[in-house]
Image: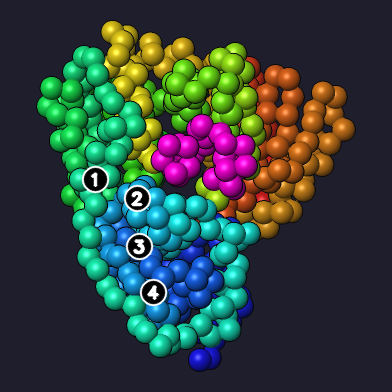
Amino acid sequence: MAPILDDAALDAVFKAYDVRGLVPEQLDAELCRSIGNAFVEVTGAREVVVGHDMRPSSPELAGAFADGAASAGADVVAIGLCSTDQLYFASGHLDLPGAMFTASHNPADYNGIKLCGRGASPVGQDTGLREVRERVAQGAGRSAARLGTLQQMDLLAAYAAHLVGLAPVAGRRLKVVVDAGNGMAGLTVPAVADRLGADRIELVPLYFELDGSFPNHEANPIDPANLVDLQKRVVAEDADLGLAFDGDADRCFLVDERGEPVSPSTLTALIAARELERHPGSTVIHNLITSRAVPELVSERGGTPVRSRVGHSFIKAMMAETDAVFAGEHSGHFYFRDFWRADSGLLAALHALAALAGTEATASELFGEFARYPLSGEINSTVVDPQAVIDEVRADHAGLDGVRLDDLDGLTVTHDDWWFNVRPSNTEPLLRLNVEGRDEATMRRVRDAVLRTIRSHR
């Protein structure tokens, strides 16, 4: 079979830890069929599990991948509509490699594939994705002597029961507003809420209708503009907490009872504390854009903090190496050893609910115990040459007294009173900036200075 795309076109869709692109210009059924075939060839899988989100293109692309996998001889378990962490549950529960069709928080005209090995193990460029790309480039399309079969399976109830078992919610009844952003949380949150029961949670749904055109706002809660509706509703409902999920519901963001956003770093610190209570002395991983409050609190509570670069495949691999009990990213991804080291926005939400229900404190009081320093949040800028911008930022700070530079992921510049990281996105043509300071004035001063340099290149 002739190659489907040239190297440049394949490089555009094969990212550091997933496949993602515009449909159908960059990613279509033919390419997905070839990827499915190549994935089976690379993994040697005799059976794979496939799921997809609510995007209009997802069923066709997932079906094409399944066809390609079956043509290579693998049986396919199709679980249909699901969140990404539900696909990870399926992979762990069934001990099968898996493929999730989603473009997460990207706009409606994008789609993608998150691949995993058996037991939800990571598949990135260094753990199989590069080999899949190479086979696609060579024209993957082998027909096995025995074609695989297709089996439909509904795992939603089992997934919900598993999550609730990992983070039981007991104590006072909570009123919680949830913004699903028309994404997959509109399917998974009700299943978990039903499992908890009406005596534990009063659920106020917002945008639960599955709609991959995202008619209300982008399903990207890291952007403050996409939290506005949730913030207003939490205050109007006099709710205890607000939860916001991205399109494939693997990320979770919180809003307290005042309508104020809770930093994902703060939630990382809270969950880390809970896990260290259960597993004293354990390792906790945090990525390099997480607040320095996280490693401080982990150390204070007897744990071992370990710093990682951004990205699920890197963090999952590091969790396996260190036997870490938990990992958190400032982007809203939270990983759990007892969830096959995979990330789950809903499991993180359950930990927050369990902590809040077990106290008489308000959400702002509870989370205030784990917040120490002001963070800028992630600021994205479109630039022509990201590396040239990073090089200029490096030159601006190299040799300054008390300043340390490292290149673990992009460029991190650290001072005793502040730090910032600037790095290119792995999935979009953006440069991402995160800044933290010992106080608000310091954070703003550093943020504004670095932004001036970045945006002089737009």
Q: Magenta part of the protein: which range?
A: 314-343
Residue drawn at x 41%, y 40% as measured from the top left: 339
Check disc 1 and report the residue beneath it: 158
- Crowding near the residue tagged with mark 2, few <14, some 14–19, many ≥20 C-alpha atoms within 10 Å: some
The reply to whether dot 2 and dot 1 touch (C-beta < 8 Å) is yes
- The residue furthest right is 399
- The residue furthest top is 360
Dot label at residue 74: 4
Label 1 sits on a secondary structure element that is: helix
Q: Which of marks 3 and 4 is nearer the N terminus?
A: 3
Check disc 2 and report the residue beneath it: 93
Q: In this view, does 238 lie above or below 41?
A: above
Label 4 sits on a secondary structure element that is: loop
Residue drawn at x 62%, y 54% as measured from the top left: 383
Quarter-wise, where is residue 97 in the image?
bottom left
Label 2 sits on a secondary structure element that is: helix
Q: Does the magenta stretch include residue 337?
A: yes
Quarter-wise, where is residue 165 in the image?
top left
Q: Does the magenta stretch include residue 81?
A: no
Count of numbered badges drawn on the protein: 4
Q: Which of marks 2 and 1 is nearer the N terminus?
A: 2
